[in-house]
Each structure stands twice: as C-alpha cells, then as structure tokens.
Image (cartoon, grey):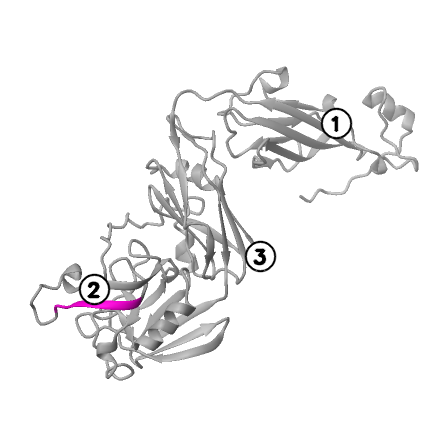
Amino acid sequence: MNHSPRTRTVVSCAVLVTALGAGTTACGSDGDPLSAKPYDAAGLISFNAPIDVGKRADPDKPLEVAVKAEGRITDVTAQDSTGRYVAGELTADGSRWHSISPLAASAHYTVTVSTEDDDGAPGRKVLAFDTTKPADQKRLGVTFGPDAGEYGVGQIITAQLSQEVDDKAQRAVVERGLRVDSVPAVPGNWYWVSGKELHYRPKEYWPTHATIQVHSNLDGVKISDRLRGDKSKALKLTTGDRVEALTDAAAHEMTVYKNGAVINTIPVTTGKPGYETRNGVKVVLEKQYFVRMRGTTVGIAEGSRDSYDLPVYYATRVTWSGEYVHAAPWSVGSQGYANVSHGCTGMSTANARWFFDNVHEGDVVKVVNSNGQSMEPFGNGFGDWNLDWKKWRTGSALNGLPNGGQTSPDTVRLQPAAV
C-alpha cells in the first residue's frame, strides 16, 4: 500500500518513552525511531468485543481491529492453530482492518497487528483468542479426486460435496475454502459443474513434474445458518511428462508427442458416418487390458447391420460413454485410409500395445477434423479443456455467475465401448 510522504518530527528518546509507557523505547542506538524494535502497541489498538474482554468470540461475526488517531495499522495477520489464514481488508488510511473470510468455530486464533505511530516508530500487538462451539448443524464434507498418485498434465482436480450448495454467496464461501497449490505455481480456478461438484484446472496444462497439493479449509466454517464445513482429507498429486496424442480424423493418423517432441506416428481409423468420433480435447480416464465391447451398450440393436460383440485388447478409455483408443486387428486394412469404427480410435494390436504402455491417466488425447460433435465439457469424462480460459473463469463463484451459466450435466451411464 502506498502512503503519501510526511514530515517526521525529531524528538528526544525521553519524550517518546513517556508517551509509550515505561519500559519501552522508540529510538535505536543511533537515535532513529525507525531502527527501534517494535513497541507494545496495546495502547493504540482495539478489537471488537468480546475478543478484547477475554471471552470466546462468535465465529459468525467478523474480526475487527482499529487504531487510535495518533497511529495507523500497517499489517494484520490472523491465523488459526491449523495454519489457516483469515483474509481481511485494511482501509487506505490504516485506521481499521476487518476480516472478509469467516472464522471457524471451535478454533484457536493468533492475531498479530503491526502499527506505526505519528513519528514512524513501529509497534506490534499479538492477541490469542478462541471461538465458540457451533450449534448442531449439518456438515459439508468434501471429497477430492482423483486418487493420490502421478498423472498426466491434463488431469482435472475434482471436489465432490456432501450437500447441495446453490446460493452464490454460499458457493463463494465454499470456494474460498478449497485450496490448490502447485510447485511450480500456475494460475487456475474452480468451476461449479453442479451444486455438488467442482472441477479445478489451470489456465494451461499443468507443468511437467509438478507437485499439486489440494486441501479444504472449511472445517468449522459457517456456510449457511444450517450448514458448516466438515473435516476433509487432503490430496497430493504429481505430474509426469507432457504426453499428447493428436488424432487427425481426416488424415487417419495419430501423432504422439512427449514434451513437445514427436515420439510416434500411428495409422488409425476413427468413427464412420453416423458414428463420428468427437472432436476436441479428452483426458485419459483409465486403461483396461481387456474389454468386451457390445453394440447394445451404445444403442445399436442386436442383430442389426451395425451390431457387434467383440473382445478388445489394450483399451485406453477417454469418455465414460464408451470411446476408447484400442487394438482393432479386424480393421487394419482401413487404418491410415478410411474411417470405419463406431466412434473409437482403432489401430493395430502392436500399436495399441505401444500406446497403452506409453500413456497414463491424465494424458491428453485430442481429435481434429472429424465430422463428429464436440467433446462435452462435463459429464462424459474430462472435456474441461474445451472451454477457453475466459469462459472457464465464469464458472467460479468468485468471478461472476454461480456456475458460469451452465446447467447441471445429465448423468452419463457408464458404458463399455463403441468400437
């Protein structure tokens, strides 16, 4: 914060000692008040009741700190015993600070207030207090996903809530309490997919070999009159190399990149007319060595011209509705020349084995130049990357609309596959 320069009056140490109380000094050995250790600023500042009278504080009321006319607040740090910080705002003139994030119930807080008097001498006051226990209320649990482990740079972080949260202000409280920290650090934010589900992604793909820590600060925090945050298990992820598979459906070819360098080019076949493969970015969801694929699971009548019932190997799943990259030895003659599948990306058994061994959950699979529809952003896997950053940010309760104008996605039934 910038402050206009002001003239400081030179006074003797004896005068300052009298003003600040016995046992304190505002001058260093060189007579410069700015070189002194911080004095006890208890006489300059005040806290809102009941904190300043030694009682347990109501966590539903904001924390407020004020300073007398002869000084100003330069900094306030409020932190509970678990390490959670309280966000706050300081007025431009330094006369008052108040919290803007809620306190937690049944918590122990330490507040450090730094001040400056009219002569520029630094002061400090440290105060500890406890908040009252909450009344009986529902608790909001948060379950983070995926499971801990190493993933590709396209992996999406998910947060499943135990209770529906639809109010915009309540969503903002929840979102402020969900923390994602990465090393190296990258910008990112949450998107409300529905009232019970949030997704988190950075602006671009995650950095390679990053460490991602996810946790909730909502324990004990008031979300509504009938709902408080509950304890939640933290999550730690790491990323590996940047692996991207780009399928050009018109060229019938997949190019696989690792950290920007081409490591393989594979002839493929994608969806034929009526079953075109979805365009856009998808993320590897899981890998299955063997899957039995039936046309009936994707709405194809048994016994019809397009029906099938096949054993499929080296199947890498990219949508919950049944789109895979897999071995298709029956279509080797068309791979690299024509699109003959029911929506999956097919390749030879040897190439499918290589792909299976070299990609992992969270790696990126992108399809271009297909006549199919675009990949859904939500509800059928992780199509989140198909929203540009401007649109993605509107899904945050802290940046505008509660859910970015999106309706809750329809549930997509888990289906074996479309070959």
Q: Is residue 368 left or right of residue 106?
A: left
Which x, y percent locates residue 186? 54, 56
Residue type, mark 3 in image: Pro
Find the distance from the CA under tag 2 to the CA under tag 3.
41 Å
Q: Look at mark 2 in the image and give the residue it sits on.
A: 293
Which x, y percent locates residue 24? 84, 24
The foreground one among 225 and 74 is: 225
Q: Nearer the viewer, mark 2 or mark 1?
A: 2
Find residue 184 and name its label. 3
The foreground one among 307 and 12 is: 307
83 up-or-down from 150: above or below = above
Classify mark 1: residues with Cα within 10 Å, few (<14), some (14-19) or many (20+): few
The foreground one among 360 and 3 is: 360
Extent of the magenta region: 307-314
Q: What element carries label 1?
A: loop
Find the distance from the CA under tag 1 to the CA under tag 3.
44 Å
39 up-or-down from 285: above or below = above
Q: Is mark 2 on a helix, strand or loop?
A: strand
Residue type, mark 2 in image: Met
Q: Is mark 3 on a helix, strand or loop?
A: loop
The image quarter in which residue 324 lies? bottom left
Find residue 177 and name its label. none
The foreground one among 173 and 286 is: 286
Q: Look at mark 1 in the image and give the residue it sits on.
A: 70
Q: Main secondary structure of the magenta part?
A: strand
Residue type, mark 1 in image: Glu
Q: Is residue 316 left or right of residue 412?
A: right
Q: Nearer the viewer, mark 1 or mark 3?
A: 3
Contact check, label 1 and label 3, Cβ < 8 Å? no
